[in-house]
Image (cartoon, rainbow, N blue to C red):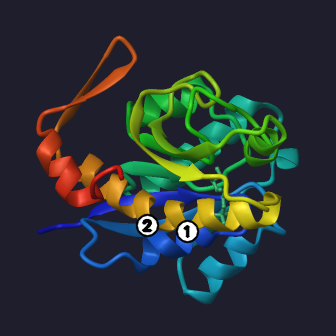
Amino acid sequence: MKKVAVAVLASGEGSNYRALQAYEGAPYEIALLGTDDPRAPALSKAREDGLPTALLPPEGFPSREAWEKAMVEVLEESRVEWVVLAGFMRILGPFFLRAFPWRVVNLHPSLLPSFRGREAIARALQRGVSWTGITVHLVDEGVDQGPVVIQRPVPRLPGDDEESLTRRIKEAEHHLYPRALHALLEVPFRVEEGRLLWADERKVRLLCGEPF
Ligand code: GRF
């Protein structure tokens, strides 16, 4: 079967990019890694892998929309069908999202709607939660607000600090994100009133595993 061309957009470490790349049996092929940050380790990782990259530092563009137009052009040239955000630090606006309707997916290190925005892990720890987790969601114009695709809980263990909890959250992300993308590409879904509804929940569970 022909694989779906996806782009990964990343501004950080790129550990999720690597997990997406390493996932066996993927119905997708990463066509390109895009970034806004020349110092992003994700960019070096993609270059090491010999993957085409697109570096678009925002300073080079007069407006957010101009940046988005340039990135959409690059993605369309590479025939990208889905956009996978993996630690991408720019908020995407209407121009970009209209080019990929309900085909931009993000990963957030909390159980949304708790702890939206930056420093989610540190803020969860500071509030003393016993459980936090991870959320894969489709991207709409709100920040960390789009329809939930799938979530997994991660406990705070005795003695956890930001580093140890981040490590376990990332482990959960590396497992779940490629599988969630697999489900999005293979299981039909629709979005109604901000909620994602699967045509076949059983198949999603088979692909992603049981929640506990
Ligand atoms: C992940 O924890 C993800 O939840 C958040 O950014 C982080 C990216 O990590 N959106 P990495 O760059 O993939 O290692």
Q: Nearer the viewer, residue 33 or 123?
A: 123
Q: Residue at x 17, y 40 (%)?
A: 201
Q: Residue at x 55, y 34 (%)?
A: 96
Q: Residues within 10 Å of mark 1 (few under 14, many from 20)?
A: some
Tell me if label 2 and label 1 are in contact, CB under 8 Å. yes
82 up-or-down from 145: above or below: below
Judge from the rendering whether residue 211 lies leftward or rightward of residue 138; answer left or right: left
**Which residue is label 2 attached to?**
175
**In which quadrant of this rendering is ligand 1 seen?**
bottom right
Give SS at disc 1.
helix
Q: Residue reaching furthest top?
A: 193
Give SS at disc 2.
helix
Residue 138, percent across and down? Answer: 44, 35
Q: Residue at x 56, y 66 (%)?
A: 16
Q: Nearer the viewer, residue 63 or 32?
A: 32
Q: Residue at x 63, y 29 (%)?
A: 114
Residue 48, percent across and down? Answer: 63, 88
Judge from the rendering whether residue 163 lies leftward or rightward of residue 199; answer left or right: right
Q: Which mark is residue 171?
A: 1
Give, as a three-letter code, the residue at label 1: Glu
Q: Residues within 10 Å of mark 2 (few under 14, many from 20)?
A: some
Q: The N terminus is located in which quarter? A: bottom left
73 up-or-down from 144: above or below: below
Give, as a three-letter code, the residue at label 2: His
